[in-house]
């Protein structure tokens, strides 16, 4: 084997260090996203075999709609069950039942996740560029082989970080209403308010006076 300068080995070592750093950034971002999701779901457990969530009170949230813009499946519990739940005040203030969203695409799915994946990919690019740039200098055949091997090794090893770029989005779930977030908000706003007994005006109550001053009591 021919002579290989120390700077070549340092470049190879630095490239491998950057590759490890890229996977480290991606791993930390995954863990942070998992912790954030666990906090957001508040103890709810997702059951993939049923495609439903189970709350700490052993009630189920079933698929309600799919948001194609954000690639999110929305699950909602029965309002009747939620409104009668003794711990509702610690779970949700909505009269329509607790709602939970789930990204249908694998990591990275959201914009924040793709941002962190982009940082990892940028570090991986630096890991490839460093030994590649040294190959452009006057090097011996042995040094070119060492540097070229490092470039190929880093490029192949970093390919999992780039896999999200070639992954096509999953299709719309079958049998679920397609509804954007704006449609959901508009639907709730336009929904008629449920009238309760206490909502009746005093003029509609027996024994009360009408605007004309006459009593609406029972006929004698």
Image (cartoon, rainbow, N blue to C red):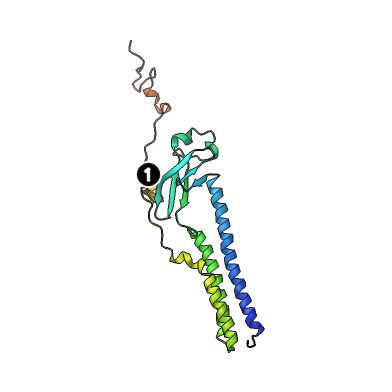
Tag 1 secondary structure: helix
Q: In front: 76, or 16? A: 16
Against 193, residue 197 (above or below) is above
Assign the C terminus to one quadrant of the image.
Answer: top left
**Residue at the image position 39 percent from the left and 54 percent from the top:** 68
Q: In front: 220, or 142? A: 142
Assign the N terminus to one quadrant of the image.
Answer: bottom right
Query: Which residue is label 1 attached to?
Result: 187
As drawn, the residue found furthest toward the right would be 6
Against 218, residue 189 (above or below) is below
As drawn, the residue found furthest toward the top would be 220
Against 213, residue 149 (above or below) is below
Percent from the top left, x then y, of residue 30? 55, 58
**Residue at the image position 54 percent from the left and 40 percent from the top:** 56
- How many callouts does the rendering have? 1
Percent from the top left, x then y, of residue 63? 42, 45
Left or right: 51 with respect to 129? left
Against 146, residue 56 (above or below) is above
**Residue at the image position 62 percent from the left and 75 percent from the top:** 14
Quadrant housing residue 216 = top left
**Residue at the image position 60 percent from the left and 64 percent from the top:** 24
Q: In front: 210, or 28? A: 28
Percent from the top left, x then y, of residue 202? 40, 24
Quadrant housing residue 135 = bottom right
Left or right: 28 with respect to 190? right
Percent from the top left, x then y, of residue 6? 66, 83
Neighbours of disc 1 within 10 Å: few (<14), some (14-19), many (20+):
few
């Amino acid at each position: 084997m021919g002579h290989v300068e120390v700077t070549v080995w340092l470049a190879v070592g630095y490239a491998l260090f950057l590759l490890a750093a890229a996977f480290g950034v991606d791993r930390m971002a995954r863990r942070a996203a998992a912790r954030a999701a666990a906090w957001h779901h508040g103890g709810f457990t997702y059951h993939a075999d049923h495609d439903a969530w189970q709350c700490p009170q052993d009630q189920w949230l079933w698929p309600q709609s799919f948001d194609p813009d954000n690639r999110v499946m929305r699950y909602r519990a029965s309002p009747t069950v939620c409104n009668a739940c003794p711990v509702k005040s610690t779970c949700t203030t909505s009269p329509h039942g607790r709602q939970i969203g789930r990204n249908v695409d694998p990591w990275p799915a959201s914009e924040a996740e793709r941002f962190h994946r982009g940082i990892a990919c940028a570090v991986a690019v630096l890991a490839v560029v460093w030994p590649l740039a040294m190959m452009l200098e006057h090097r011996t055949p042995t040094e070119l082989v060492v540097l070229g091997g490092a470039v190929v090794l880093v490029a192949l090893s970093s390919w999992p970080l780039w896999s999200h770029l070639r992954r096509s989005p999953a299709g719309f779930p079958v049998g679920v209403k397609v509804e954007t977030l704006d449609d959901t908000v508009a639907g709730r706003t336009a929904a008629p308010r449920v009238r309760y007994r206490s909502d009746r005006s005093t003029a509609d109550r027996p024994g009360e006076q009408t605007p004309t001053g006459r009593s609406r009591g029972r006929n004698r």
